[in-house]
Amino acid sequence: MSILINKDTKVLVQGITGRDGAFHTSKMLDYGTNIVGGISPGKGGSDVGGVPVFNTVEEAVKATGANASVIFVPAPFAGDAILEASYAGVELVVCITEHVPVQDMIKVTPVLKRNGTKLVGANCPGLITPEECLIGILPAMIFKKGNIGLISRSGTLTYEVVNMLTENGLGQSTCVGIGGDSVSGLYFIDLLERYEKDPDTDAVVLIGEIGGDAEEQAAAFIKEKMTKPVVAFIAGQSAPPGKRMGHAGAIISSGAGTAEEKVKAFNEAGVPVAKEPNQIPGLVKEKLGL
Amino acid sequence: MKIHEYQARNLFRKYGIPVPDGVVCHSVEEVLEKVPNDDKLRVVKAQVHVGGRGKAGGVKLAKTKEEAVEKAKQILGMDIKGLTVEKVLVADAVDIEKEFYVGLINDRNAKAVTLMASAEGGVEIEEVARVSPEKIIKMAIDPTMGLMDWQARKIALQLFSDPKEVRQAAAILVKLYKLYVESDSSLAEINPLVLTPDGQVLAIDGKMNFDDNALYRQKEILKMREVTEDEQKEIDANEKGLSYVKLDGNIGCMVNGAGLAMATMDMIKLYGGEPANFLDIGGSSNPQKVVDAMNILLSDKNVTAVMINIFGGITRCDDVARGLVTALTEIKTEIPVVIRLSGTNAKEGLEIIKDYGLPTVSTMSEAAQKAIELSQK
């Protein structure tokens, strides 16, 4: 078991003919992800490295039975690409594209709810169930099958932490990069719920950052509902208030969303917070009694 | 992106939200020229991109034209929280019966635009939210329907009692929402929204921010952008696909990914150093980006060492390494550079760096400590 994706997940790539789309399709194929088709309007009938290309998501779903899609289209078209996948009945949509306007994400939200679509991102690195399925731009070689779940608002910081976990013999069940935007798809609590139920996950690493109060909400959820141990890290402890730190969501406004408050909330929920990323494996081992 | 109060007022007018008359002036001469010669009570307001103008002495009443000139003279050139006042708004003062707050934001929890209103207008709403959150009415708006008339009425009814006033206020809310959505705003506030003794509802002060990610489709809004020197650097960086925020320290950071960039800054601080900036070179692996990033970093004269921290996912380390070599060859800086590469094509990347003759380190902690050490030499 795992959460969200496994070896049976059939994946479409929206924007497969672009530079990044084509490059990461080949990487995902190398990893063994079951990529059944790509979408590029006007290029239907061709193929990219052996993957058939369709004009629309609907056609691709009909022809392949795909149940997941990953989006690499440019930001002005990303909202529409999410909607297209949702209306075509794709169950899990992963949007890699960054700089998607907030209003576009707000518009897709009720549609996703109505159609029962799960969205990861936008502005995220994707997700992976090691040795089964990789969707997105995660560097495959650092992951190892195991029983640690990981959720992160960051991309490269996730890789950093995963690398340390793997080097310390802590493999992963599923790792999810939820993205750094202020309005996104699945968030901490949605995933913590799934990890709690997943028999293959024994502990969860949560990588948060400044801005918003999702970490505080996650801490409250952990305190009330989780039996499995959680270890956290918060990026942006040194960030000044009022400045957007790259991620649209990473901004401390009027004293809310500071690293300090988040650390406090986690500590109160019995969640240890690492001071620097390389402390995370040790804290996980301690919690698991290893 | 932020705009000034007078620009927000112009947008309000365009959407039919009533605001008192006013003129914006860049100099005392302009005040002499533009303000009518009468004894109308006016308010002279500094136009800067920060809050708390009143407390800083940037908002003054003037009973005559002479007084308006006098006050403008005092306010123009004034420093408010590090920003120089280059413009004043001279607006008609109105008699106020009661003050309210109304605002729209993108609510990350509701994943919707949320309308906020309060009978406690004129003060900082964050303060009201902190001290007595029950005094703020909130309503999430369904994006497929927009702010419906009954919703606007429901909010207005909680602030006003006279039916004529309720109608005016509800109409203002609907117009403000339309403006908000059509301009890809991320914050739109009327504070205060006032009721005059003769029963008029007016927007006295306005604040609007916009979603940077949507500026590509907001040409008219973009024309209103005014930036400080530091902000200009940040915008130039953005146009090159980089996100840059200048800080006060001396260790320049170049990192791929915002989360890792924040963690890198944190790490430098943890080991006793001070980061000079936040710089995320982002998702693509174009070598030109690295060249641009180095140029931006080194244009900050406080920088005494540079720490480059790359964990390759979508950004391939070999591309980064080639970009670094190109940039360093081009720039020929004396400032020491510490490079740490890991992830996609890291081996190839490290080979390129080694061939060029630069030292490399393998962990983040090591890189931070090395950069701090070199910055002190």
Image (cartoon, coloured by chain):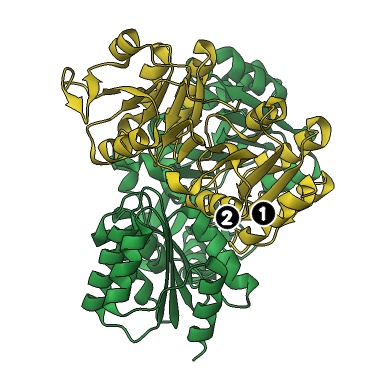
Q: Mark 1 to mark 2: distance in Å?
A: 9 Å
**Mark 1 falls on what kind of element?**
helix
Q: Chain of mark 2?
A: A
Q: Amino acid at mark 2?
A: Glu
Q: Are marks 1 and 2 on the same chain?
A: yes
Left or right of B285 in this view: B254: right
Q: Which chain is yellow?
A: A
Q: Residue at 54%, 19% (x, y): give it.
A: B142
Pick whichever, A33 or B3, lies toward us: A33
In the image: residue A258, left or right of residue B372: right
Q: Nearer the viewer, residue B55 or A164?
A: A164
- Give residue A281's mark: 1
Q: Secondary structure at mark 2?
A: helix
Above or below for B301 versus A269:
below
Q: Tag 2 or tag 1, which sits nearer the N-term?
A: 2
Residue A259 visible from this viewpoint? no
* Residue B69 placement (x, y as % from top left): 46, 65
Q: Quadrant of residue B292?
A: bottom left
Residue B320 percent coordinates (x, y): 31, 61
- Residue identified by numbered label 2: A167
x, y percentage for residue A277? 62, 58
The disc numbered 1 marks a residue on which chain?
A
Q: Which chain is green?
A: B
Taking depth in this image into account, of B193 and B211 the one nearest to the observer is: B211
> Which residue lies most toward the top here?
A62
